[in-house]
């Protein structure tokens, strides 16, 4: 029997059971396709990184004597559509059976499921063997419940996998050290040099130019810094554990103009392409903690592990529990367009200028820059969720829809009405000043609301609360802020709203 096995660009798991032994009756296929490069406008580093990792993966499989069919973006045989490429190979190689791993994106899952109903050969679906949980585990965990609190799921994951748990109780006495993870970074705490790999992707970039594929952002094609194979991914993990874990928790929410990555791991691209697994990352972090308990506080370790076994697995589970309708949620009825400066970084607001330029230059911004700078501004200016979804999905090298969509539409934009976040993540300029040095270098004053030089976040924040009062005033976590809003005089509120409406109507002037 001749078997064709499909490997998608985010399924580069060399430890998968498929690859235990080479079989002359099995052929693997990977495709670089316009279907995937064009459905949103992607960062040039994202496209080049995925293609580089896919090519490295295919070359490694060939070295291990697996049969590989790899269609590059400009291959004359490439139909540029997934099912058309598969049909081509079925005919060329007299395939008797088609096998694939569960896609993590609903769009691809449906495309392949529908395709398998139409073909006249056998087909079979396999697990990706990557996550701690299966697709439907979270839905089963929350079955019959009205709230889907990540913290409840996270604690269950800790117990189930015996991670930082002693006799079913949290090691150190607390389940969550989030309150210790909110320090503002200062230069007295030295940040080690980042681990970069200087991968040469100039050939790929040239091929993208020949194909006239549209993209955003910048790239130094001879120095792509993220891991593109398993060996590099493991080195990135080792570097994080040795040099960065010691301060990760303290400064995971901090932002600074002088340092893009601070103590973050730079592992998300490697993990989301499955070159490295969450299980081996957590195991390595725990091993490092056990060996260096006198140096590394539990708050650093718990803060990191919570992002992996809590937030990442939770987001995947919520995605599969709520799709496909989740992609159309717009609870707050926001309809404005994304300002042009999200694509250029040309804004006078220093926080946004830094967050957007980080994104354009590096295909990267950490979770607080995404949530409380770009996401916060998009929500306060009432941008349509579709607009901000497309931007987040395109601009970050680690962005794949199963993790991007629930983070953006749920956590960041509150478009789901509270299925993921218990309140909208909005703030005035005071929070940004608390967590960064952005405000001290800005032309706007973070303490003022309505003057010419007032920080736009301030009037936008109070205007947002007023305009969304019907949807949000009953939210128990918003009561204090609505109490403050209620004490404003009508003239004060009118002045704030006038300022906010001017900003919303002239976004690219700020």
Image (tube, grey):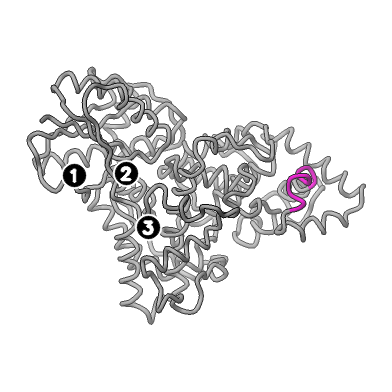
Which quadrant of the view contains residue 125?
Answer: top left
Horizontal side of residue 264 vs 124, given as left or right: right
Q: CA distance from mark 1 to mark 3?
A: 34 Å
Which residue is under mark 1? 18
Instruction: Tell whether label 2 touches label 3 (CB within 8 Å).
Output: no
Image location of residue 64, percent across then percent down: 10, 44
Nearer to us of marks 1 and 3 is 1
Instruction: Tell whether label 3 touches label 1 (CB within 8 Å).
Output: no
Residue depicted at 60% across the width and 53% down the height: 146
First of labels 3, 2 by sequence position? 3
Residue depicted at 45% across the width and 70% down the height: 300
Image location of residue 410, percent across then percent down: 57, 46
- Which region shows up in magenta? 466-474
Residue extending furthest toward the front: 144
First of labels 1, 3 by sequence position? 1
Q: Is residue 329 above or below residue 242?
A: above
Q: Is residue 208 above or below residue 50?
A: above
Which residue is under mark 3? 194
Nearer to us of marks 1 and 2 is 1
First of labels 1, 2 by sequence position? 1
Q: CA distance from mark 3 to mark 2?
A: 14 Å
Horizontal side of residue 137 vs 428, given as left or right: left
Residue extending furthest toward the bottom: 294
Residue depicted at 82% across the width and 47% down the height: 450
Number of residues whose C-alpha sits closer than 10 Å to that of mark 1, classed few (under 14), some (14–19) or many (20 or more)? some
Q: Secondary structure at mark 1?
A: helix
Q: Secondary structure at mark 3?
A: loop
Residue depicted at 63% across the width and 37% down the height: 330
Which residue is under mark 2? 223
Image location of residue 52, percent across then percent down: 28, 38
């Amino acid at each position: 029997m001749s078997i064709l096995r499909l490997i998608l660009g985010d399924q580069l798991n060399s430890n998968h059971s498929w690859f235990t032994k080479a079989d002359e009756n099995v052929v693997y296929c990977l495709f670089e396709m316009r279907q995937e490069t064009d459905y949103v406008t992607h960062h040039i580093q994202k496209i080049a990184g995925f293609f580089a990792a896919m090519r490295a993966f295919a070359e490694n499989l060939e070295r291990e004597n697996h049969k590989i069919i790899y269609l590059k973006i400009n291959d004359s045989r490439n139909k540029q559509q997934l099912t058309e490429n598969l049909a081509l190979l079925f005919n060329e190689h007299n395939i008797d059976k088609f096998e694939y791993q569960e896609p993590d994106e609903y769009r691809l899952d449906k495309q392949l499921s529908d395709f398998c109903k139409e073909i006249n050969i056998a087909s079979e679906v396999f697990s990706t063997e990557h996550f701690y949980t299966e697709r439907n585990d979270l839905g089963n965990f929350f079955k019959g419940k009205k709230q889907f609190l990540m913290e409840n799921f996270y604690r269950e994951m800790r117990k189930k996998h015996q991670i930082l748990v002693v006799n079913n109780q949290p090691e150190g006495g607390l389940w969550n050290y989030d309150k210790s993870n909110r320090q503002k970074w200062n230069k007295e705490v030295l940040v080690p040099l980042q681990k970069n790999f200087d991968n040469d992707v100039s050939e790929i970039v040239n091929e993208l130019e020949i194909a006239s594929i549209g993209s955003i952002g910048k790239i130094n094609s001879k120095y792509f810094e993220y891991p593109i194979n398993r060996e590099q991914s493991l080195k990135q993990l080792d570097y994080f554990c040795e040099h960065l874990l010691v301060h990760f928790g303290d400064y995971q929410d901090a932002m600074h103009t002088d340092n893009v990555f601070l103590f973050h791991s730079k592992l998300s691209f490697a993990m989301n392409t499955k070159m490295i697994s969450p299980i081996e990352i957590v195991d390595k972090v725990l091993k490092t903690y056990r060996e260096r308990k006198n140096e590394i506080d539990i708050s650093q370790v718990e803060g990191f592990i919570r992002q992996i076994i809590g937030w990442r697995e939770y987001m995947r589970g919520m995605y599969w529990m709520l799709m496909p309708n989740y992609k159309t949620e717009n609870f707050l009825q926001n309809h404005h367009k994304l300002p042009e400066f999200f694509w250029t970084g040309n804004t006078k607001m220093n926080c946004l200028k830094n967050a957007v330029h980080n994104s354009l230059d590096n295909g990267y911004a950490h979770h607080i820059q995404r949530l409380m700078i770009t996401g916060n501004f998009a929500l306060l200016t009432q941008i349509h969720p579709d607009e901000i979804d497309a931007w987040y999905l395109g601009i970050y090298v680690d962005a794949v829809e199963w993790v991007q969509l629930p983070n953006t539409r749920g956590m960041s934009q509150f478009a789901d009405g509270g299925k993921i976040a218990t309140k909208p993540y909005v703030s005035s300029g005071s929070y940004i000043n608390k967590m960064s040095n952005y405000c001290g270098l800005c032309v706007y004053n973070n303490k003022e609301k309505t003057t010419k030089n007032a920080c736009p976040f301030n009037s936008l924040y109070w205007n947002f609360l007023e305009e969304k009062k019907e949807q949000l005033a009953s939210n128990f976590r918003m009561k204090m802020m609505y109490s403050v809003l209620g004490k404003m005089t009508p003239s004060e509120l009118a002045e704030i709203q006038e300022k906010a409406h001017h900003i919303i109507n002239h976004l690219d002037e700020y």
